[in-house]
Every structure is written in structure tokens, then in C-alpha cells.
Image (cartoon, grey):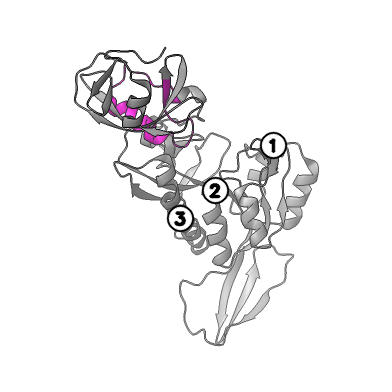
């Protein structure tokens, strides 16, 4: 981290570390730039697609990203080919140094590597590992996390998905300074984003990631300028967003149609929403909640439309579905192919 002093047409960067000499940087067109901030030395820890805009925006802002830390390549697909994480692929395009440790807490080689880089801050966006205390203590500005919720709501691994699943109409991003707890660190900045009625986990992720990337750049500038005042989270308002499991996608017809629809939206692309039809898995890919009194889990056919009964005198109209081992199909094609009986039950 540096202090800035201006003298005419030049700037002197003074490192806050006494062992580092000041650096003279010429700016021949600079006269007065009160919001000027010098590039920071950063380490970036991230893995998923959501983290890519943050990495690229920080690089575009001129920050010095000395190292990108991401998860090891994982086997994927039928051939189990090793696939690099989205963040690794982005870092390669940016010609950034990359490391992919299997473990970090007790990895002395990794610890020495990070310490030698003397980062001003460590940026963490969906890395997928718990950050050990030695990493938290390393940089002067701390470990800065971009979290896809308005903390303290939705602490955990799947905040965006659970926000949609619970029927929220507003979500957002939080930048915070990581501490030893689960998303309990001091809040730096927050910004809201509306959730559209038809948003899914897939459609909401890109705008949320892009907004979060800008918020990270703004956060670092504010920390340098001293204009950000960290605030404690109100633990009494905290809610959890645990990692998604396959069983979260199992449709419970004792819920209302709106509740099931919200979970279907939130849990895209995985685990989705599914039930059983004649002993086979039935994925519900698109549906709409309606007011129609049908016994829970029973089917009702009206012309080329098919409805499944839910709680509270509601039902779910199936728009697109996919039976195990078959291609996805419209409700109309499903009806013609399988001819479900009136009041036939799902879940068996």
C-alpha cells in the first residue's frame, strides 16, 4: 500500500513498508486529481464463473495482481477430462501467475509464496476454501470478500440461489473484510439489485457478478482514500444459505405452488426441481403457479395442459418437463406420449 504526494507534474509513491524506497512516477498531464489512487498489490482467490468479472475488472483498473489462486483442475463429463476453473481460464487470458494448491491451511510452501509477494490485500470471490488465520493476518488491508447477498442475510455458499428460492424481490452484493467466522466480517460496501419475477439462478448470476466486480473496485478505492468505514453485522438479522444438495430439488407438494416455483427458479441449473412419475425421475424445467384446487401431488389434465396439485388450493402448471432417459418436451408432447390418468399421483 502507498501514500501519494503530488509535486507539480509528478507523483511520489511512498510505501507504507519502511523498507521500500519511494517511487517517482511522472504524469505530465496531471494537474489536480483528488480521487487519484495508486494500484494495489493483490492476490486473487476465486474459482467459479461468478468470480471472473471481478478478476478482470480489477486487472482493468490497473491493480497489480501478482498471483491468482484457484481450485485444482477437476474431471468433468463422460470422459472425465480435467477442466480448468473459469477463473484459471480467465487468468491465463490475462497472462497472470496461477497456483492451484490442494490444501492451504497447513501448506508451508504456499504460505511462503504468499508472504514473499507482500500483498496489500487478498481478494476472495467464491474460492471454495476456508481462509486460514495466517492468510487473514498477512495483508495490511486484510482479505476482502465479495459476497452475493445483502449481509447479514444469506450467509453461506449459495446466497443467490436461496434468495430466489425464498421469494426475495431484492438481493445484492456485499464487500466485507473476512474474519474467522462464516461470512461474519465487517461490511465495507453494499449495493442492491432487483430480482425479476422470472429470474433464475442462471439469469441473475451475470448481472450480480458484474455489479459485484464494480463494487470491489470501488471498495479498494474507498479503502485507499479512507472514505470507507467498516460496520459490524447485526447477527440477530442473519439467515443462512447452505451449500445446495440434490435433495433440495425434490418437489414437496405440501408447499404452495408459488413456493415450489421459487425453488425451481433458484435451483437452476442444479439441483433443479424433480419428482417421480411411474417410478422414473421427472425433471420440471419450466412451470407456472396458478390458483387451481387439486389434491397435492395429483395430476389434472385440461386439454393440452397439465397441472399438479399443491398446498393452499394452488397448483403448478407444467410447461416443460423431462422424463428420465428421455429428451426434454413440452407438456403437450408429454401428454400425447404418456397419457397420464386423471388424478394420477406424482412422487411414486
Q: What stretch is highlighted in magenta?
A: 249-275
Extreme residue in the right direction = 109
The x, y position of residue 13, in whole percent, is: 63, 73
The x, y position of residue 300, in whole percent, is: 25, 19
Q: Do the residues labelled 1 and 2 touch (CB within 8 Å)?
A: no
Residue at position x 66%, y 39% from top? 133
The x, y position of residue 303, in whole percent, is: 22, 27
Callout in the foreground (3, 1): 1
Q: Are marks 3 and 1 in contact (CB under 8 Å)?
A: no
User: Which residue is the site of mark 1?
Assistant: 80
**Is residue 165 or residue 38 the one in the foreground?**
165
The x, y position of residue 278, in whole percent, is: 42, 14
Q: Is residue 106 visible?
A: yes
Residue at position x 45%, y 55% from top? 210
**Is the residue marked by circle 1 packed among few (<14), some (14-19), or many (20+) residues within 10 Å?**
few
User: Which residue is the site of mark 2?
Assistant: 49
**Is residue 261 or residue 173 the one in the foreground?**
261
| Mark 1 and mark 2: Cα distance apart in space | 20 Å
Element at label 3: helix
Residue 210 circle label? 3
Residue at position x 45%, y 32% from top? 241
Residue at position x 41%, y 32% from top? 238
Q: Does the magenta stretch include residue 267?
A: yes
| Mark 2 and mark 3: Cα distance apart in space | 11 Å
Element at label 1: loop
| Mark 3 and mark 1: Cα distance apart in space | 31 Å
Q: In this view, does 343 lie to the left or right of 225?
A: left
Amino acid at each position: 500500500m502507498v501514500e501519494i504526494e503530488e509535486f507539480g507534474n509528478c507523483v511520489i509513491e511512498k510505501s507504507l513498508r519502511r523498507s521500500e524506497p519511494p517511487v517517482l512516477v511522472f504524469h505530465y498531464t496531471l494537474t489536480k486529481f483528488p480521487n487519484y489512487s495508486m494500484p494495489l498489490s493483490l492476490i486473487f482467490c476465486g474459482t467459479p464463473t461468478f468470480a471472473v468479472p471481478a478478476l478482470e475488472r480489477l486487472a482493468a483498473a490497473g491493480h497489480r495482481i501478482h498471483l491468482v489462486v484457484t481450485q485444482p483442475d477437476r474431471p468433468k463429463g463422460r470422459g472425465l477430462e480435467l477442466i480448468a476453473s473459469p477463473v484459471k481460464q480467465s487468468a491465463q487470458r490475462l497472462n497472470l501467475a496461477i497456483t492451484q494448491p490442494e490444501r492451504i491451511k497447513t501448506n508451508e510452501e504456499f504460505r511462503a509464496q504468499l508472504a514473499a509477494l507482500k500483498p496489500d490485500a487478498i481478494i476472495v470471490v467464491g474460492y471454495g476454501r476456508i481462509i486460514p488465520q495466517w492468510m487473514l493476518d498477512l495483508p495490511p488491508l486484510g482479505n476482502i470478500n465479495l459476497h452475493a447477498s445483502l449481509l447479514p442475510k444469506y450467509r453461506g455458499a449459495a446466497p443467490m440461489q436461496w434468495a430466489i428460492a425464498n421469494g426475495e424481490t431484492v438481493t445484492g452484493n456485499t464487500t466485507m473484510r473476512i474474519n474467522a467466522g462464516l461470512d461474519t466480517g465487517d461490511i465495507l460496501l453494499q449495493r442492491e439489485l432487483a430480482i425479476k419475477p422470472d429470474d433464475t439462478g442462471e439469469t441473475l448470476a451475470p448481472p450480480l457478478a458484474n455489479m459485484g466486480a464494480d463494487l470491489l473496485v470501488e471498495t479498494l478505492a474507498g479503502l485507499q482514500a479512507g472514505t470507507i468505514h467498516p460496520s459490524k453485522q447485526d447477527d440477530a438479522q442473519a439467515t443462512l444459505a447452505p451449500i445446495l444438495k440434490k435433495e433440495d430439488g425434490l418437489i414437496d407438494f405440501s408447499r404452495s405452488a408459488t413456493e415450489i416455483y421459487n425453488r425451481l427458479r433458484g435451483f437452476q441449473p442444479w439441483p433443479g426441481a424433480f419428482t417421480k412419475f411411474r417410478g422414473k425421475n421427472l425433471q420440471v424445467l419450466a412451470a407456472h403457479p396458478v390458483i387451481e384446487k387439486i389434491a397435492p401431488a395429483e395430476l389434472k389434465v385440461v386439454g393440452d395442459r397439465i397441472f399438479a396439485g399443491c398446498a393452499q388450493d394452488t397448483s403448478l402448471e407444467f410447461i416443460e418437463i423431462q422424463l428420465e432417459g428421455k429428451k426434454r418436451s413440452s407438456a403437450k408432447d408429454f401428454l400425447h406420449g404418456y397419457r397420464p390418468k386423471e388424478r394420477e399421483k406424482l412422487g411414486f
